Image (cartoon, grey):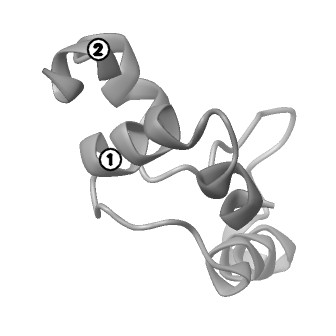
Amino acid sequence: MGQLELKGPSGVFMHAMIYGSGIGRIGTPSDISNAVSFLLSGEASFITGTDLLIDCGVVGSITTNPPQRLLN
């Protein structure tokens, strides 16, 4: 899905978001499955009722450094 967005009309915006993220790359299926494995493990037994944002800091990046600034 991300690859399609990169090639579509919002591609420039998406590249800016990736550039501003913590790792600077698009997420992979294993990035998501690793988080799911953790949440299903005993190590996460005290975690309830929360949203886990798995985006490499993209939302935080856009909040503090909007892509418009990255594109200039």
Q: Name the residue rendered at 68%, 70% in the picture.
A: 35
Q: Name the residue rendered at 28%, 49% in the picture.
A: 19
Tell me: residue 68, above or below residue 70: above
Work out how far the residue at label 1 is from the one at label 2, CA to CA, in angstroms. 14 Å
Front-most of 43 and 10?
Answer: 10
Residue 71: give x, y in percent of width and height: 22, 27
Crowding near the residue tagged with mark 2, few <14, some 14–19, many ≥20 C-alpha atoms within 10 Å? few
Q: Which of marks 1 and 2 is nearer the N terminus?
A: 1
The residue beneath circle 2 is 68
Tell me: residue 49, above or below residue 62: below
Q: In which quarter of the image is residue 24?
A: bottom left
Residue 22: give x, y in percent of width and height: 27, 53
Kind of residue sitting beneath label 2? Gln
Q: In this view, does 28 lie to the left or right of 21?
A: right
Tell me: residue 18, above or below residue 30: above
Residue 63: give x, y in percent of width and height: 37, 13
Front-most of 59 and 71?
Answer: 71
Q: Does dot 1 land on a helix, a strand or a loop?
A: loop
Q: In this view, does 18 lie to the left or right of 26?
A: left
Q: In which quarter of the image is the C terminus?
A: top left
